[in-house]
Image: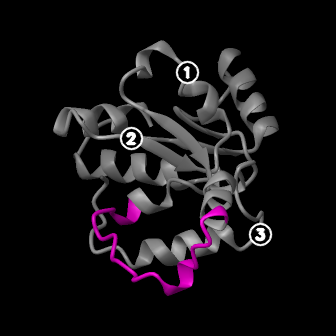
Amino acid sequence: MGTMGRFLKEQDGTAKTVFIGPCTAKKTEFQREEYQGYVDSVMTFEELQALIDSKDIDVTTLEKTDLCQASYYGRIFARSGGLSEAVASDMKNRSSEFEVKPISCNGIEECRSALLKASKGVLPYNFIEGMACKGGCVGGAGCLNHDDKNAKKIDDYAKEATSENVK
């Protein structure tokens, strides 16, 4: 969130940046000193839906646009395992001698367990993807629904990407 906000402000100093997503933790992150001036506001999907409803906007009547800039890997990061897949692919594409051995932690308890094992030197992985919410960001508290099919919807959307490169 902060890096993207910084990038957008560098491109256009007059831009207003609003992070919209399922993560309620972004509300606290937004207040951190290093993001001041880069991110102007944060909204959850629930808050966005409330705003749309309050303005009587029927989103089904709006013209659809293609968001083709995001790659396959850019579209899967929001589900558990997506970030690990992107990092492993990028490192492989760089012909790096460093082999990524990721573990995808799905939920806070799995994160806690992996971090404890890492602190004791018994974790056989060298990259920890820690998704505090079950299922990843798609299971975040600010989502409109918590359907088990959300990860599949993300994968289906990712398959529509015109690029597989990590971006």
Query: Of helix, strand and loop, which mostly describes the magenta segment?
Result: loop
Span colored in magenta: 54-73
Q: Please rate how many residues cluster around mark 1, counting C-alpha atoms within 10 Å: few if below 14, some from 14 to 19, many from 20.
A: some
Disc 2 residue type (three-letter) = Thr
Find residue 160 and report its image quarter: bottom left
Q: Position of residue 156 (x, y in %)?
A: 52, 78
Is residue 67 magenta-colored? Answer: yes
- Contact? badges 1 and 3 (CB < 8 Å): no
Q: Secondary structure at mark 3?
A: loop
Disc 1 residue type (three-letter) = Gln
**Distance in Å between CA atoms under marks 2 and 3:** 29 Å
Q: Position of residue 109 (x, y in %)?
A: 82, 36
Residue at 27% from the left image edge and 64% from the top image edge: 69
Q: Is residue 10 above or below residue 15?
A: above
Mark nearer the N terminus (1 vs 2): 2
Q: Position of residue 129 (x, y in %)?
A: 58, 40
Q: Write down the residue under mark 1.
A: 31
**Distance in Å between CA atoms under marks 1 and 3:** 30 Å
Residue at 76% from the left image edge and 65% from the top image edge: 145
Q: Is residue 14 above or below residue 88?
A: above
Is residue 53 magenta-colored? Answer: no
Q: Point out the residue furthest to the right here.
A: 109
